[in-house]
Image (tube, grey):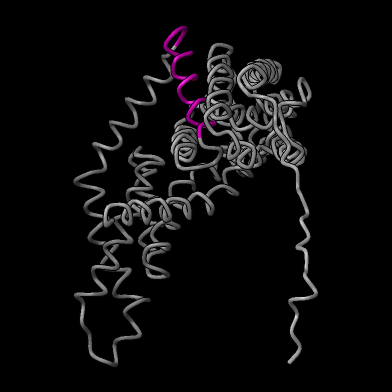
């Protein structure tokens, strides 16, 4: 029970970090993509006293935003754990993580450490009444920044940076079968529970790699999130007898949500027949993820569904992967599901025996 509660808390804080970070990631990614597409891959601004174009400004602004991701993630996690006193040390831990190359995952760890350190200090640090107002503004942020900052600099920063560098190098060197296998596993994870914990793990992994300059996993995440609603919709169009009226109504909602990369619309359909729907969607997403890696599709923007496809490096490749994954999901669903049986609603009116009514 305690372990479940702790895991639940850790996940809640991570989701808070993601919710604060995501707008920055999307805005920065779009700025980079738009600047590169319209400005023909302009260079970053290196000298602000010399003339520069608006596309250089857009790309530079996006890169600045990307560099803030570890700090925002770390600060949001620390804030979620320890409230306002966690913001300053959280920001600093994210800056350290970015500076030493520990990146997104280093920022996450720094945020947790900062928040937990603040909560520990709240219990052990005792000050006179006149100094209590200084606790959240000065004493707790300062002590936490010193303690966790030194830990980040001298203890855990370099190992995390080394692991991050190794992982990035490994993913960048993947080709052929190993790349396809990675794409298949990640695609299946992203579609497995329709926005649940497994999906969030895959999403966090992809977002972390985005900061390291590995953009393929983001394209997998987007593709795998859209395949379940598209696949279910295509299956319904192929054989409508497989779905009840209630499921059909839910599919009409799930499809437009899928265009926006919201996969949760499939949950009501999966709830009716979980094994067949999860297997079909995960298999289709795995095929889509493998194709994404094989065709070298990359996305600098982590969210936005069909609206950010033009900003990808290979939009046609993405649409092919999305289409094949959708068709695989639809065929499997159509083959595996059985025809729906509509439950007849019978309105039974209770007969009333007037002779039994007694008036007192």
Q: Is residue 34 above or below residue 124?
A: above
Which residue occupies 71% across, 23% down?
Answer: 235
Q: Quadrant of residue 150?
A: bottom left
**Residue farthest along the front direction in this orientation:** 355
> Residue 179 colored magenta?
yes
Q: Is residue 306 above or below residue 290?
A: below
Residue 198: percent from the left, percent from the top? 45, 37
For the N terminus, the image quarter is bottom left
- Indicate whether 276 appears above or below 350: above
| Displayed quadrant of residue 332 | top right
The quadrant in which the C terminus is found is bottom right
Q: Residue furthest top?
A: 176
In this rendering, position of residue 294 left or right of residue 245: left
Q: Is residue 351 magenta?
A: no
Q: Does residue 147 appear to the left or right of 302 in the view shown?
A: left
Question: What residue sits 31% from the left and 79% below the top?
Answer: 135
Q: Position of residue 227 (x, y in %)?
A: 64, 27
Towards the viewer: 190 or 146: 190
Residue 280 lies left or right of residue 174; in this view the side is: right
Residue segment shown in magenta:
175-192
**Residue 311 horizontal/vertical position (percent):** 69, 29
Residue shown at 38%/48% (left/top)? 108
Vertical relation: 272 (above or below) 284? below
> Residue 300 appears in which quarter of the rendering?
top right
Q: Position of residue 244 (x, y in %)?
A: 73, 35
Tell me the residue at 75%/48% (across/down). Answer: 345
Magenta stretch mostly in which secondary structure? helix
């Amino acid at each position: 029970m305690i372990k479940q509660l702790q895991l639940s808390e850790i996940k809640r804080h991570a989701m808070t970090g993601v919710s604060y970070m995501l707008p920055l990631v999307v805005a920065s990614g779009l700025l980079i993509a738009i600047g590169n597409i319209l400005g023909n891959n302009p260079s970053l601004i290196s000298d602000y006293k010399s003339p520069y174009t608006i596309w250089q400004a857009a790309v530079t602004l996006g890169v600045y935003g990307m560099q803030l991701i570890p700090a925002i993630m770390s600060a949001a996690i620390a804030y979620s754990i320890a409230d306002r006193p966690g913001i300053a040390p959280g920001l600093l831990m994210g800056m350290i993580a970015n500076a030493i190359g520990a990146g997104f995952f280093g920022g996450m760890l720094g945020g947790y450490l900062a928040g937990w350190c603040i909560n520990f200090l709240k219990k052990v640090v005792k000050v006179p009444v006149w100094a209590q107002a200084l606790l959240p503004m000065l004493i707790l942020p300062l002590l936490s920044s010193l303690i966790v900052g030194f830990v980040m600099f001298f203890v855990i920063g370099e190992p995390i940076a080394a692991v991050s560098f190794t992982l990035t190098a490994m993913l960048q060197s993947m080709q052929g079968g190993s790349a396809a296998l990675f794409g298949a596993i990640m695609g299946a994870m992203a579609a497995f529970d329709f926005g649940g914990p497994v999906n969030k793990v895959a999403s966090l992994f992809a977002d972390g790699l985005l900061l390291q300059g590995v953009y393929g996993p983001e394209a997998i995440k987007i593709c795998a999130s859209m395949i379940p609603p598209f696949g279910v919709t295509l299956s319904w169009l192929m054989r409508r007898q497989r779905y009840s009226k209630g499921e059909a109504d839910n599919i009409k909602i799930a499809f437009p949500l899928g265009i926006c990369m919201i996969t949760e619309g499939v949950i009501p359909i999966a709830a009716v027949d979980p094994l067949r729907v999860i297997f079909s969607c995960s298999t289709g997403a795995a095929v889509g993820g493998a194709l994404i890696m094989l065709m070298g599709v990359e996305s600098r923007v982590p969210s936005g569904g069909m609206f950010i496809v033009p900003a990808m490096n290979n939009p046609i490749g993405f649409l092919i992967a999305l289409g094949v994954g959708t068709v695989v999901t639809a065929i499997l669903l159509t083959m595996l599901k059985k025809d729906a049986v509509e439950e007849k609603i019978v309105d039974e009116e209770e007969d009333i025996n007037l002779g039994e009514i007694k008036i007192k």
